[in-house]
Amino acid sequence: ASLLARRESQPASMTEYTRQSCHVCRRAVWKDAEHAEANRAVLCAACCKHSEPPPICGICFDPCRPVHLGCRHSFCEDCLRTTATVAIEEGRSVLSCPEPGCSRTLAEPLLRTLLPEAAARRLLENQNARTRDWSRSILEGAALARPDAPEVRLV
């Protein structure tokens, strides 16, 4: 009862805090409501003390624990997963770095750890369809180049 009475007697201007996670190391950080709304990127005291600023995701521009690609670009895991999943849903069979102008292909081991199972299956289907289309165009091109060649039918 005394705790409840003490709580009710506290001034109305007392600040409320919310628990959030540091965007770099995932440690718990307590932020007051005013700062939690103003700053999207939350950093703990240890990450703020680093001499170098924390890495920034090239997609969401928040500080993050980056996934480094072989082309020196880095992105947070969530943004990279979302970008790859959308590309797969669009029918792409080869996934490359999301940085504009970069054509570095994403490595298969990275995609295996990054993608949910359904997206990985869809990527494989897209790759198989691309291979069939490529094979068909090669065979049809060979038949056009040699009109006397026997007819080739693809099943």
Image (spheres, rainbow, N blue to C red):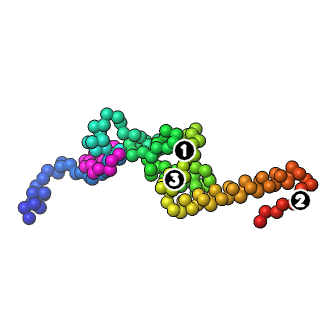
Residue topped by disc 3 = 109
Q: Nearer the viewer, mark 2 or mark 1?
A: 2
Identify which residue, 148 or 31, lies in the foreground.
148
In the rendered image, residue 37 lying in the magenta stretch gets the answer yes
Side of 120 relative to 37 (left or right): right
Q: Verify CB contact (< 8 Å) between mark 3 and mark 1.
A: no
Circle nearer the N terminus (2, 1): 1
Q: Earlier in the sequence, mark 3 or mark 1?
A: 1
Regarding mark 2 in the picture, which secondary structure is present there?
loop
Judge the density around disc 3: few (<14), some (14-19), many (≥20) Cα neighbours within 10 Å: few
Q: Which numbered disc flags the more N-terminal residue, 3 or 2?
A: 3
Q: Could you tell me residue 93's position as x and y percent?
A: 62, 53
Q: Amino acid at mark 1?
A: Cys
Vertical order, 140 against 105 (above or below): below
Check the image and name the residue furthest to the left.
Answer: 2
Q: Is residue 145 left or right of residue 16?
A: right
Q: Residue at x 55, y 59 (%)?
A: 120
* Residue 150: image tag: 2
Percent coordinates x, y for residue 153 in the rendering: 82, 63
Disc 3 secondary structure class? helix
Q: Quadrant of the C terminus?
A: bottom right
Residue 87 colored in magenta in the image: no
Q: Secondary structure at mark 1?
A: loop
**144 and 31: which one is in front?**
144
Q: Say which quadrant the N terminus sits in.
A: bottom left
Q: Which mark is residue 97?
A: 1
